[in-house]
Amino acid sequence: MTTSIDSAMMRRFNKTAVFRTIYQNAPISRVDIANLLEMNKATISSIVDELIAEEFVIEIGYGESRGGRKPMLLSLNENAGYCIGIDVQITHVTVALCNLSGKIIEQHHEPIYLSDGMSVQEALLQSLIAASKKVISKAPTSKYGVIGAGVAIPGMVNSQTGYLHYLPNLEIHEWNFLESLRANLKIPIFIDNDANCGALAVQQTCHLNHLVFVNVGMGTGVGIITNGNLIHGYDGIAGEFGHTTIAAMGLKCSCGSYGCWEQYASERALLRYLQEVGAYNLPSFPSAHFIEECVLRADTGDALYIRAFQTLGQHIGIGLANVLNGLNPQIAMIGGPIVLAGNYILPDIERTVANRAVSLNRRVKVHIASPETVVHGAAQLVLRSLLLVDIESLKESGEFPTPLTLPH
Amino acid sequence: MTTSIDSAMMRRFNKTAVFRTIYQNAPISRVDIANLLEMNKATISSIVDELIAEEFVIEIGYGESRGGRKPMLLSLNENAGYCIGIDVQITHVTVALCNLSGKIIEQHHEPIYLSDGMSVQEALLQSLIAASKKVISKAPTSKYGVIGAGVAIPGMVNSQTGYLHYLPNLEIHEWNFLESLRANLKIPIFIDNDANCGALAVQQTCHLNHLVFVNVGMGTGVGIITNGNLIHGYDGIAGEFGHTTIAAMGLKCSCGSYGCWEQYASERALLRYLQEVGAYNLPSFPSAHFIEECVLRADTGDALYIRAFQTLGQHIGIGLANVLNGLNPQIAMIGGPIVLAGNYILPDIERTVANRAVSLNRRVKVHIASPETVVHGAAQLVLRSLLLVDIESLKESGEFPTPLTLPH
DNA sequence: GAAGATAGTTTATCATACAAACCAAGTTCA
DNA sequence: TGAACTTGGTTTGTATGATAAACTATCTTC
C-alpha cells in the first residue's frame, strides 16, 4: 500500500479538491475557491485553467460585484459526459442515463426474462446489457461520452473484486459478476450493494458524513457512511443487518439463524402481518407491485392494511434503533420498495426509535427516501470513482486511480 | 475542512510514512524503506536524517550484507519519550507508563475512593490524578519526557470534544471531562471509549484493518475498526451494541428499552444466570473480583458455574454474530474483565457465531484478548495522535495536527 | 474622475521529491 | 589476491508545484 506523495500526486489531490469544490458549490469564483480551500489564488487559477481546457468546468458569466471587479463564475460542465446507473431487482432492472451532475436524463425498465435452458445468471446479464445499450444509445454526443456504469446489487458483493457472493431470491452464489458484465459492456463498470448505493446518493444530496440507508425490500440491508466513507468490511459484505437477531428465539430465517430482522422488516414480513390480521386474497409471495397494491388498500382506509403497515414500522424501528446505537449516524434514511408506504410506517418507526435508541441517538431524524435513490447512487459509483477521487479513496484502495484524465 | 496539500504538508505526510514504516518494521534499512514506500533513496535518507536528529529514530548497527555494502539498520528510539495509558473502571483506575513502542514500564492501580461530601466526578478526578502523578514520577529522564496521557472510559464519550455524555454505574451525565482533567494534568490528554481503545491496541499488535473488540464488563461495548480507522459516529458514541435488541420482548434494560444485548452478555447477566441455575452465596451486585471468583469456582469443577459461563458465551455469541453481520470484520476480539473466563466462554461463542453469522462472516476468528489490552490502547491514543498521524486522520479531524514536532 | 476595493494574472522564489552520478563497502570468482 | 560485480547510501542537478508579492483589470463609492 502506497502512502507517499510526490509533486504529481500533490497536484492531483489539489486538482480534485478544486473540482469537488466547484461540483458542490457552483456557481463559484476562483477567489472563493481559494478562500474555501485556503490555497493561493495563483494555484487555483492554474488548476481551473486545466479543468476548463479539459471541459470539465465552464465559465458561466460574471457574478455580482462585491465592491470591485466582477467575479467570473465557474460551474461543472455537466454535459461533458454521461454515466449510467443500474438498479438490479428481483424481477427487473432499472437503468438510468445520468449527466455528470447525477441528473437522470433517460430511464428504462427491463424485465429479467428467464427463457428455456437459460441460467439465472445469463438472464440477468442479458437484461442488464439490453437495458444498458438502450439508454447508452440515447446519450447525446459529448466530449467524454458514456464514462462508465454503476450497478446496485440487492445482495452480497465485493465492490473491489467484483465478486457476487450471494444474491438471494435469484439464488446466485459465488459468481464473478464484474468479469461477466465487462465481457459484454465495453465501458468501466463499478458495482456495490444496493443499500450502499442508496447511502452514497443520500450523501451526495445532503452533504452529510455520518448516515445510514436502510433498504427494505424482499430483504433488509443497510448502507453505512461514517466520516464520509462507505463501510464495506473485510470481504465487502458489511451492512447485513437484515440478518442480525432481534428475537433470539424468533422465526427461522433462510440464513439458518433465528429471529433475523428481515423476518420482521421486509416485504415478506408485511405479507405475514397481513395474513396474521386476517386479510384475504393475499398472494403466496410478494409480487413486483406488492407494496403498491397494499398502499392502495390502505389508502381506501382498510384497517387491516394500515395495521399491518404499523406493525411493520414498529419492527423496522426496532432494528433501526439497533443500527443507530451501533453506528451513531447523523440521519437515517429508509429506502427500497417500502418507501411507497412511507406515510404509513414512518410514525411507528419514529416512535419505536425514540423508545429504543440510547442517549443522543434518540435525536436522529428518520426520513423516507425517494424511489430513485438507489439508481442515483449506482450512477454515483461512477462519478465518485472517476471524478471525485480524494485522499480518502486513495488510502482505501491502496492503488492510485487516475481522476480527471479520461480518454477521449 | 482542509483538503489541500502544499510542499510542507507533503513532507509531513512522507515523514510520517517513513516513521511509521520504521515503527512497524524495525530493524529496517534505508533502502528497504525506499522499496516499501516506493520512494527515492535520497528522499528517505533526507527524512531519516531529520528523524535521527530529533532522536525519534536510532541507528542500531549493520545488518547482513546481501552481496554488497552492509545496510545500516534503523529502529525506533523507544525511550525518546514516554506516555501514559489510563483504564478507568467502576471501582478503580489502572495507570500504565509506556515507552514509545507501547511497552508497559510501570503500572499502578488506584481505587476510586468516595469520601464525604465529594462528588463522583471529583473522586474520579482525584484518583486519576494521584495515579498519574505516581507513574509520571517513575518515568526515566528522556528527550521528550512524558508526552501525553490517554484515558479509556467505560461509557459514552466524544473523543473530539472531550465530553463525557454518560458513564453508567458511576451515573455521571454530560460532563466536560477533558477540561476538568486538563486543569489538573499539564500534559496533552486524549480520551476515548474503552472498547475503542481495546480495538486500537489490537490493531497495533495484529496490523489488521478490519476488526471488532467486544468489551464485556458491567456493560457491553464494541470498538470497531474498518479500513484501519476507528468508527466514532456523529456524536462519538458509536459502538453501543450493548444496547441493541437481541430479544424484542426481553428483559427491561436501564436504558429504557427491552432485550438489550448487555442484559444477556455482561457481568450482571452472568450473576443472573448463576441465580437461575441455583448457585448459592451470590453477591447482590458483581464485585470488583466477581469474574475472578467465578472462574475459581468453575476451576474446581462446579457445574453450576460452568453452565452459567456457557450460557453467557451463547449470548455473547448471539450479539457478536450481529456485530459480524453488520460490520464484516476480519477478526473479533473479546476483552474486558470477562477474559479471565475465556476458556469457559469461547467454545460457546464460537459455536453460536458459526450458527448465526451469514456467509463469509462464519469464517471470522474469535479471540480472547489479554487483560491489559484496554490500558495498552489508552496509551496508543497518545502514540497514534502524536506520532502516527497520516493522511487518514487528517481527513478525519479536518484540522492538521503536528506530528513529530514535540516541544523539547 | 480620483480613491479604494475586489478579481484575477504574472513573476520570482522556495521547498521537496526525483534521477543519475557518485562514493563506500561488501561479495564472488578467476 | 585483486578485478568485477553488487548493494547501501550520499551528493548534485533538475523539475514540479505551491506561495508571496507585484501587477493588471474592472468595478464601486463619493
Image (cartoon, coloured by chain):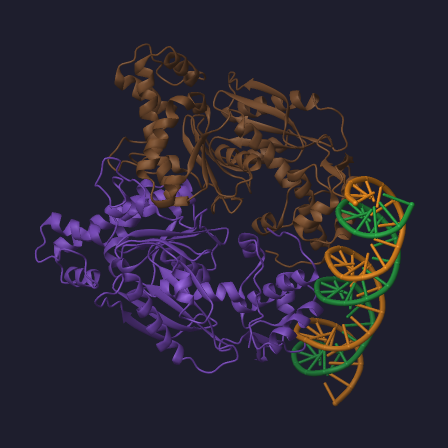
Chain colours: A brown, B purple, C green, D orange
Where does the C terminus of chain B fall, quadrant-wise?
bottom right
* Residue A110 placement: quadrant: top right
How many numbered dots are placed on residues in this image?
0
Q: Is residue D3 above or below residue A387?
A: below
In depth, the one of A206 and B350 nearer the eye is A206
Residue A383 visible in the displayed image: yes
Give x and y (percent) for residue A326: 38, 44
Residue shown at the point (66%, 50%) measured from the top left: A37
In depth, the one of A64 and B39 nearer the eye is A64
Q: In the image, is A303 to the left or to the right of B33?
A: left
Residue shown at the point (70%, 40%) measured from the top left: A28
Q: In the image, is B295 to the left or to the right of B279?
A: right
Q: In the image, is A120 to the left or to the right of A66?
A: left
In depth, the one of A82 and A297 nearer the eye is A297
Q: Is residue B86 above or below residue A20?
A: below
Give x and y (percent) for residue B23: 53, 68
Q: In the image, is B299 to the left or to the right of B75?
A: left
Residue A262 visible in the displayed image: no
Give x and y (percent) for residue B308: 17, 51
Give x and y (percent) for residue A318: 33, 34
Residue shown at the point (47%, 68%) measured from the top left: B188
Residue shown at the point (68%, 72%) measured from the top left: B46
Q: Is residue A302 above or below residue A220?
A: above
* Residue A179 placement: quadrant: top right
